[in-house]
Image: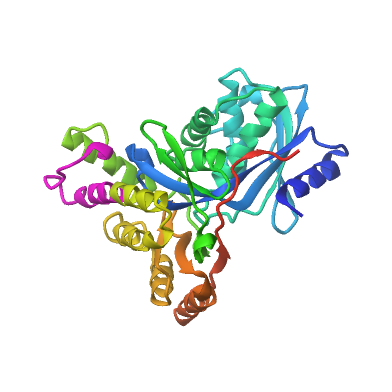
Amino acid sequence: MSPAGQAAAEFRRLHDRAPAGVWSAPGRVNLIGEHTDYNDGFVLPFALPHRIAVAASPRSDGVLTAVTIGADGLAQHATPTPIADLEPGLIGGWAAFPSGVAWVLRGHGIDGGADLVITGDVPTGAGLSSSHALQCAVALALLGLADVTVPLPELARWVQRSENDFVGAPTGLLDQTASLCCVDSHVLFLDVRSGEQEQIPFAPADHGLGVLAIDTRVKHSLADSAYGDRRKGCERAAELLGVPSLRDAVDIDGLPDNLLPLARHVVTENARVLRTVEFLRADKPHLVGDALTQSHVSLRDDYQVSCPELDVAVEAAVGAGALGARMTGGGFGGTAIALVPTELDKTVRAAVASAFAERSFTAPRMFAAVPSPGAGRDY
């Protein structure tokens, strides 16, 4: 059963009535362009087929209730809370994500109560943006119940605020925009500073290729990790260079030793995104592999957000014939992606599994990352 179907069925079971509607949003893979979004740079994500679904109905008392159904089928109930009472710091854990969205929408005059039932199959803690998929689905559900339409790029900024100011994670704009705005069989080329978007066709299977996602099963939390330290370092580097952001940096050699590698990664990563875009516009996806691997090396050595499991996944995949591979997401664990010729898919998967086993790492979860539709209403 799809996440949307499961959400509707669970809503009926828990509330003894059908929901008013079901909305869902996908996780995402970032093909390239990591840690560039909060530096006003360029990113190139695509949506995954994995989704978080929210079945919802309005309430007349202004209270928000939320239930999430885990992979084990067990329900976790958030404490019912009046939307008028929501404030940062009031709610923790998974319930902070839907509550934060309701808090932001309240500031825009959308404050009706709702019953929410949440299901999904986006792996959590895998760097595939499960939390943003949840927030985007909740945002669409609450807007749908209120019969209000918000332009998706603007809604992405609302969701970003809910994570930054309510949940307390200093994330950029990549994940929300990807979940809301990506379309089937395309990558989204986003200029974060201007907001300009370009949907670029990306159907690797047509070229005998596939994107293999390798979930290392190493969990991470952006709110509790060194992610925030990297962001502050980038802001300090831009300040010292006298530029609005590292997007504008040219000569970075005068930066202190602790900031130079951060700036070098951002500058070179933006260049890699632009080079990858040119290859894809020319319908030559087989040429992007080197940029993927160079991105990983930069994230590992300059930005220092990789981990042994991600490094092993990349090295094993490339060694077995992948055209390129890199970690994706914030880092410190999570998922790597590899651009793999179709005929070598089994070989690459076996090589990665063997490399993990040799090091007594937890066996990775591997699946095809297929460019898929963005968020929307299911029924």
Point out residue 17 in the picture as x, y percentages from the top left corner.
87, 37
Q: How is the image coloured?
A: rainbow
Tell me if I can see residue 93 in this picture: no
The quadrant in which residue 73 appears is: bottom right
Q: Quadrant of the N terminus?
A: bottom right
Q: Nearer the viewer, residue 259 or 49?
A: 49
Whether residue 301 is situated above or below residue 183 in the rendered picture:
below
- Residue 36 as seen in the image, left or right of residue 187: left
Point out residue 95 in the picture as x, y percentages from the top left corner.
62, 40
Q: Tell me the residue at 26%/40% (across/down).
A: 246
Q: Nearer the viewer, residue 198 or 64?
A: 198
The quadrant in which residue 103 appears is: top right
Q: Quadrant of the C terminus?
A: top right
Magenta-span inclusion, residue 256 = yes
Q: Tell me the residue at 57%/64% (across/down).
A: 367
Q: Write the start and end of the magenta stretch as one range.
A: 246-269
Which residue is outermost to the top? 109
